[in-house]
Amino acid sequence: MADRDGLIWYDGEMVEWRNATTHVLTHSLHYGMGVFEGVRAYETPQGTAIFRLKEHTNRLFESAHIMGMKIPYSQDEINAATIAAVRDNNLASAYIRPLAFYGSEGMGIRADNLRVHVIVAAWHWGAYMGEEALKTGIRIRTSSFTRHHVNITMTRAKSSGAYVNSMLALQEAVSAGADEALLLDPEGYVAEGSGENIFIVKNGVIYTPEVTACLNGITRNTILTLAGERGIPVVEKRITRDEVYIADEAFFTGTAAEVTPIREVDGRQIGCGSRGPITGQLQSAYFDLVTGKTDAHSEWRTLVK
Ligand code: PMP
């Protein structure tokens, strides 16, 4: 990732990709206190557009606020940096990674002289789990690792350290032959994937866990809006793993994963064992929206000029 051409926005300046480095005593590298976002830009008929940029930047600032980090830029400045990261790298479509972290000004968890540094990198990244996964769906396994309790690392913040748990869960799932993990909350109810929110469909109704043990996903919010506009009933509630087993359809959502159907959970086929009809309908609607094939919600697409 590091040895390539390009530019990364780093503390207010565009820096050559290879020179966008930081010291080995970077505080966040040691203790995991950092906050980040995953954002995507898509090609649209009007040009490249970043999807829900304002919401992502706002969540970055909320994450920092929860963690007690003060980002030394305004949201407008980070929005402009995100646009610049796509534009200056000449990307027609992109995955964008803003990150705020503590520098190497001090060490130890008591360090009180730390500066918050911010980078925004952008590069081309296709379908997170491959094109085939979007069509036929993935196989997932319930994790032996519990998702964070709201009072441990908290779940509204998209913080770097929280992803230790995600990586443990994903490693376990992949080594058992699955594509992704399903994490349960500390009480045993369904929380989310290692980097995705989960939805199930039963008898024409969509269910998704309340935002307690899962990230308040922006794709999740987009899907709730799209379902509402199509008259598909949605219920946010606690979900048990056996409810997922007997669902007619299930799918994951996320900026990286987009709308990925789930065809198997813990060795049990879900519904028809492929992308279900409601999943397909919402997936098409999602791609039409992000790629500007519809005029709807144009406020969610920020053109990169
Ligand atoms: N849950 C977790 C743990 C995630 O990492 C992500 C990806 N950011 C999501 C859910 C989905 O969030 P979003 O739709 O905002 O990308």
Image: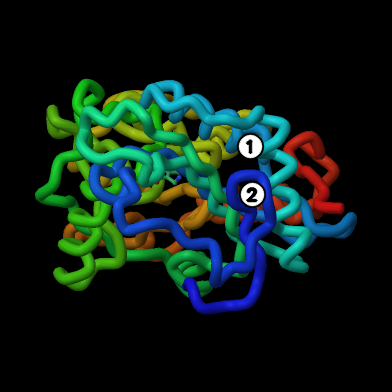
Along the viewing direction, whichever of 136 and 220 lies nearer the viewer: 220
Q: Is residue 305 left or right of residue 174?
A: right
Which residue bears the numbered disc 2? 286
Q: Where does the image place residue 114, in percent across and percent down from the top left?
A: 38, 33
The mark tally for this picture is 2
Q: Where does the image place residue 54, in percent across and percent down from the top left?
A: 67, 33
In the picture, the disc for residue 226 is 1
SS at circle 1: helix
Q: Is mark 1 within 8 Å of ligand 1?
A: no
Q: Earlier in the sequence, mark 2 or mark 1?
A: 1
SS at circle 2: helix
Q: Residue at x 39, y 22 (%)?
A: 68
Q: Residue at x 70, y 35 (%)?
A: 77
Q: Residue at x 16, y 62 (%)?
A: 172
- Amino acid residing under circle 1: Leu
In the picture, the disc for residue 112 is none
Along the viewing direction, whichever of 137 and 110 lies nearer the viewer: 110
Q: Where does the image place residue 91, in percent across and percent down from the top left?
A: 73, 67
Q: Residue at x 10, y 50 (%)?
A: 144
- Amino acid residing under circle 2: Tyr
The answer to whether marks 2 and 1 mark residues whose Cβ atoms lie closer than 8 Å is: yes
Q: Is residue 24 above or below residue 73?
A: below
Indicate the quadrant where residue 191 lies. top left
Q: Can residue 240 be seen by looking at this rendering?
A: no
Q: Is residue 112 above or below residue 299?
A: above
Q: Residues within 10 Å of mark 2 (few under 14, many from 20)?
A: some
Along the viewing direction, whichever of 79 and 287 lies nearer the viewer: 79
C-alpha distance separating marks 2 and 1:
8 Å
Indicate the quadrant where residue 190 lies. top left
Indicate the quadrant where residue 12 lies. top right
Q: Quadrant of ligand 1?
A: top left
Q: Is residue 198 left or right of residue 151?
A: right
